[in-house]
């Protein structure tokens, strides 16, 4: 009787249809997580990393050569001409800025909303954000023509009393993007501090121990350190959240404050923000699906993570599709023949192929994510994510080139074609991006060790593996 009285009465099992897929597969323990994630940066450099790194460095070198050529020769080497005075430079600037939005959204907004699935992907997404903004920042710097005057963009007092034109939205870009980049770097570094301490304690060489220890800022994992860390992380999340909405809104004002048909519309800020998140999640999927397989991270980046990111992509893609339709409605409802012509020219003009490719990649293809079987097929998800990236590039092409190439005077109409310098520079930015990303994952934990541990059953005080008690007794 005594044994029966002291026997624990465990709660009834959860029905299978209500049971969620765990965020860490196969009930991995905390030690395994540390070994697996830190081992990517600690182990011997794999062959596949060199096979990806060498071409990336060569492409980054191509970027450097193109920048030297453009600066020494002039921006006339681009394909820009009258009336298409903005071409691949602004297209690629807006595209790279959009790519960088998913990282801050995952890290900041989903943190404030207590979405626990973010922990497996936020570190790589944050790094992607920083590297994408670096690639984007190259284009405005060389777009001014005389790069040695770039410092005029900042409000630095001069003897001549020259000040930036603060009424220009291009100036707003400078402050919005630089603020976004600064806060993103600080936010990323703040999350790295506990993991840098882990790497410091596991380091086998004095050099690694010194550098990891230097940037770990003396972290010991004490209660006081964790308390200060969580407060600081919450503050940065609060600062980053409005930046997610403001940066691409301000970028959209480059177009919306003009009087040009096709640009002069108030729908641009929310439309650009949704498109940026859409393209950002597309790039996160493009990067993490191969890395998940190559680095054998299936138990950390689970199919549940992929499934949720597919749903976010579907939602934002649907918003973008609604914006496309609303643009045509506004053009018709406005009664302006110029607005109507601008949008009919997008769909039926010389660049009709770019417009319909955009519609296919950004509106039609993401609707496949309504099907669960599609979301669970990682090869199909990977292909769709690449199509999303292509479609969002063509969205910027449609907005910029197709709106400009036919202005109010038919005698000015022309057909824009990028020059070889445009193409080589764009390919070079991919080299820079992948070089930085590969270096990041080679020397730093690409997944937040401490945060992933926080979503395991062992970290849940209400779970039996976390030490929960039932009926006043111990499960141990």
Image (spheres, grey):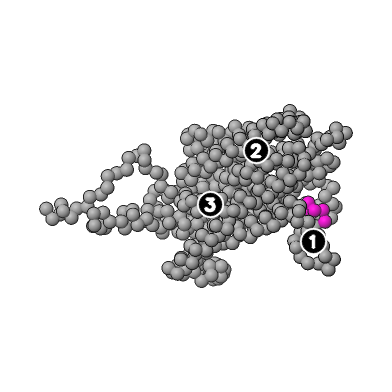
Q: Quadrant of the C terminus?
A: bottom left
Could you give the CA–CA distance between mark 3 and mark 1, rounded to whole angstroms? 36 Å
Please rate how many residues cluster around mark 2, counting C-alpha atoms within 10 Å: few if below 14, some from 14 to 19, many from 20. many
If you read the primary sequence from the N terminus, does the residue marked by circle 2 or circle 1 appear first?
1
- Disc 1 target residue: 163
- Disc 2 target residue: 391
From the viewer's perspective, is the residue at label 3 or at label 1 nearer?
Answer: 1
Residue 333 in which image quadrant? top right
In the rendered structure, does residue 21 fall within the stretch colored magenta?
Answer: no
As drawn, the label of residue 109 is 3
- The image position of residue 390, as x and y in percent, is 65, 39
Mark 2 touches mark 3? (CB < 8 Å): no
If you read the primary sequence from the N terminus, does the residue marked by circle 3 or circle 1 appear first?
3
- The image position of residue 317, as x and y in percent, is 58, 38
Q: Residue at x 76, y 59 (%)?
A: 153
**Drawn side of residue 294 relative to residue 436, left or right:** left
Q: Secondary structure at mark 2?
A: helix
Mark 3 touches mark 1? (CB < 8 Å): no
Q: Residue at x 84, y 55 (%)?
A: 72
Query: Seen from this angle, which residue lies furthest left?
Result: 1
Residue 131 in which image quadrant? bottom right
In the rendered structure, does residue 144 fall within the stretch colored magenta?
Answer: yes
Residue numbers of the magenta segment: 142-146
Please rate how many residues cluster around mark 1, counting C-alpha atoms within 10 Å: few if below 14, some from 14 to 19, many from 20. few
């Amino acid at each position: 009787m005594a044994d029966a009285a002291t026997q624990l009465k465990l709660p009834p099992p959860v029905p299978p249809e209500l049971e969620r897929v765990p965020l860490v597969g196969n009930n991995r323990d905390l030690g395994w997580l540390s070994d697996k994630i830190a081992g990517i940066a600690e182990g011997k450099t794999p062959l596949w990393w060199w096979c990806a790194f060498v071409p990336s460095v060569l492409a980054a070198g191509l970027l450097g050569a193109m920048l030297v050529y453009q600066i020494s020769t002039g921006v006339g080497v681009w394909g820009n001409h009258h009336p298409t005075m903005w071409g691949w430079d602004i297209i690629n600037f807006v595209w790279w800025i959009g790519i960088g939005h998913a990282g801050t959204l995952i890290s900041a907004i989903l943190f404030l909303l207590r979405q626990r699935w973010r922990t497996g992907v936020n570190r790589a997404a944050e790094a992607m954000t920083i590297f994408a903004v670096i690639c984007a920042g190259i284009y405005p710097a060389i777009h001014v023509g005389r790069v040695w005057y770039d410092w005029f963009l900042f409000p630095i007092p001069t003897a001549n009393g020259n000040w930036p034109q603060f009424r220009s939205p291009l100036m707003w870009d400078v402050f919005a993007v630089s603020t976004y980049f600064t806060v993103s770097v600080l936010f990323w570094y703040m999350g790295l501090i506990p993991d840098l301490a882990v790497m410091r304690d596991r380091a086998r060489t004095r050099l690694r121990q010194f550098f990891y220890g230097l940037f770990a800022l003396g972290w010991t994992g004490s209660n006081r350190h964790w308390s200060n860390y969580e407060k600081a992380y919450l503050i940065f999340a609060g600062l980053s959240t409005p930046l997610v909405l403001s940066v691409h809104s301000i970028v959209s004002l480059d177009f919306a404050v003009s009087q040009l048909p096709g640009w002069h519309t108030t729908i641009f800020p929310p439309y650009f923000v949704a498109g940026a998140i859409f393209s950002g999640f597309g790039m996160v999927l493009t990067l993490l699906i191969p890395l998940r397989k190559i680095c054998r991270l299936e138990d950390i980046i689970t199919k549940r993570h992929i499934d949720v990111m597919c749903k976010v992509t579907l939602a934002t893609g649907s918003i973008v599709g609604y914006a496309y339709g609303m643009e045509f409605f506004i053009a018709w409802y406005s009664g302006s023949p110029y607005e109507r012509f601008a949008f009919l020219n997008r769909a039926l003009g010389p660049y009709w192929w770019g417009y319909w490719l955009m519609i296919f990649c950004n509106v039609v293809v993401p609707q496949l994510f309504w099907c669960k079987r599609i979301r669970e097929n990682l090869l199909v998800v990977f292909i769709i994510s690449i199509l999303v990236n292509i479609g969002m590039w063509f969205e910027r092409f449609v907005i910029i080139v197709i709106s400009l190439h036919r202005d109010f005077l038919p005698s000015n109409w022309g057909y824009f074609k990028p020059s070889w310098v445009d193409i080589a520079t764009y390919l070079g930015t991919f080299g820079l991006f992948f070089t930085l990303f590969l270096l990041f994952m080679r020397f730093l934990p690409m997944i937040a060790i401490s945060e992933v541990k926080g979503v395991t059953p062992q970290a849940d005080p209400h779970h039996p593996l976390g030490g929960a008690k039932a009926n006043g007794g111990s499960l141990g």
